[in-house]
């Protein structure tokens, strides 16, 4: 079968049943679709300033729920979906996330992100750890009742990147070779390349190949803050959704999509520093923004020109996330998406 991703992106958002409430009392939604043997869990919205993931899952669920074209997938798989595991954060960012095209100045003015120690992605319950947030307890129970899973994904985003970046809980390059080839071809079909960033193991990020890195781990996060002499911050980290899904058994493939809000001019091939343009932008942006807030826009305009900063169309970002889900889970082949 083939899937028209434009149809999925155009679907009306699903109406999820309430499975619990957030810390501030907002409803948390979740639902399962299909009855096939391939068990897939999908969550999004953990980081409040990454708005595309929840919209992707809301529309995917709406498409699965209403479209006859989804029937073959529902016979092959069971989808367990929590589209937005951080509704309080979504509300705090609603000023700049309401439009479908993100404005750089609105983003820089109004984005609000949780501190590392209050990270819902790294807040799933763990015996002996600190008490988990209510959001994490609710989602953990939803997943526990439906696991173990064959595939789990947490949809994320980056403010700036040179292309799509995918994180996977498989460190051996041979284990991802075929998937990398498929995702590379699919990503290129949407006019985008890979983001290449070598964090050299920081927080558990180990580069596998251009565009691919290992998923960070809670233990590596703890070590990072311990090395910074911040033991109280280190103690706040609990398992990620990937680690929690894996703890339910079945050795699932777990992936994170990191799709940029703003695309940065790619670093020329052969550069000694992968992602050099991206790194340069991150180093220069704070000063440019401080000057902008003081009434001087020249430096910010200069960075926009130098790095060709353009918002990634929301539909493109949604398709990249959907393509990752369908290809990595094994539900569809590349030619069925193109």
Image (tube, helix red, strand yellow):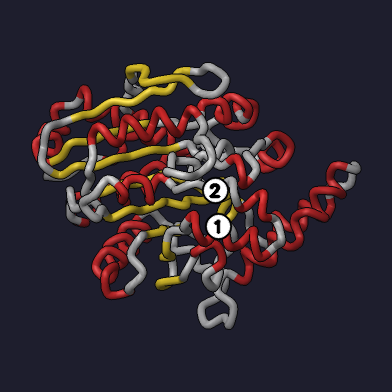
Disc 2 crowd, CA 10 A, few/some/many (<14, 14-19, 20+): many
Pinpoint residue 13: horizontal percent, then vertical percent. Answer: 35, 23
Q: Residue at x 75, y 55 (%)?
A: 285
Residue at position x 37%, y 59% from top?
A: 168
Residue bearing mark 1: 221
Instruction: Give coordinates of residue 86: x percent, y percent.
Output: 50, 31
| Numbered disc 2: secondary structure | loop
At horizontal 47% and vertical 52% (from top left) the residue drawn is 258
Closest to the observer: 199 or 271?
A: 199
User: Which residue is label 2 attached to?
Assistant: 237
Query: Helix, strand or loop at disc 1?
Result: helix
The answer to whether marks 1 and 2 mark residues whose Cβ atoms lie closer than 8 Å is yes
Closer to us: 94 or 67: 94
Left or right of residue 295, residue 270 in this image = left
Q: Quadrant of residue 60?
A: top left
Residue 159 is situated, as x and y percent measured from the top left of the image, at: 59, 49
As rendered, which of 159 and 33 lies closer to the eye? 33
Q: Quadrant of residue 64?
A: top left
- Is residue 317 left or right of 133 when viewed as pictured? left
Residue 81 at x, y percent in the picture:
31, 33
């Amino acid at each position: 079968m083939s899937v028209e991703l434009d149809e999925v992106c155009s679907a009306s958002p699903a109406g999820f049943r309430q499975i619990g409430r957030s810390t501030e009392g907002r409803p948390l939604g979740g639902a399962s679709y299909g009855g096939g043997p391939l068990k897939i869990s999908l969550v999004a919205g953990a980081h409040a300033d990454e708005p595309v993931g929840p919209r992707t899952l809301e529309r995917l669920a709406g498409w699965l729920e209403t479209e006859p074209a989804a029937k073959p997938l529902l016979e092959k798989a069971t989808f367990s979906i929590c589209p937005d595991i951080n509704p309080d954060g979504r509300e705090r960012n609603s000023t700049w996330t309401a439009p479908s095209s993100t404005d750089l100045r609105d983003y820089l003015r109004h984005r609000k992100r949780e501190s590392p120690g209050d990270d819902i992605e790294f807040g799933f319950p763990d015996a002996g750890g600190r008490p988990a947030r209510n959001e994490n307890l609710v989602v953990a129970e939803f997943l526990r009742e439906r696991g173990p899973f064959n595939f789990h994904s947490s949809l994320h985003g980056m403010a700036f990147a040179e292309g799509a970046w995918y994180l996977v809980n498989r460190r051996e390059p041979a284990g991802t070779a075929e998937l990398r080839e498929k995702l590379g071809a699919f990503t290129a079909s949407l006019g985008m390349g890979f983001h290449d960033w070598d964090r050299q193991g920081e927080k558990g990020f180990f580069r596998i190949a251009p565009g691919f890195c290992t998923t960070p781990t809670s233990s590596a996060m703890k070590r990072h803050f311990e090395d910074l002499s911040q033991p109280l911050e280190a103690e706040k980290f609990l398992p990620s959704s990937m680690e929690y899904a894996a703890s339910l058994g079945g050795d699932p493939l777990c992936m994170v999509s990191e799709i940029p809000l703003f695309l940065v001019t790619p670093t020329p091939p052969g550069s000694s520093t992968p992602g050099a343009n991206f790194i340069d932008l991150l180093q220069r942006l704070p000063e440019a923004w401080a000057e902008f807030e003081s009434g001087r826009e020249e430096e910010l305009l200069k960075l926009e020109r130098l790095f060709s900063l353009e918002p990634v169309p929301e539909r493109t970002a949604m398709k990249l996330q959907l393509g990752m889900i369908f290809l990595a889970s094994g539900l569809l082949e590349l030619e069925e998406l193109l």
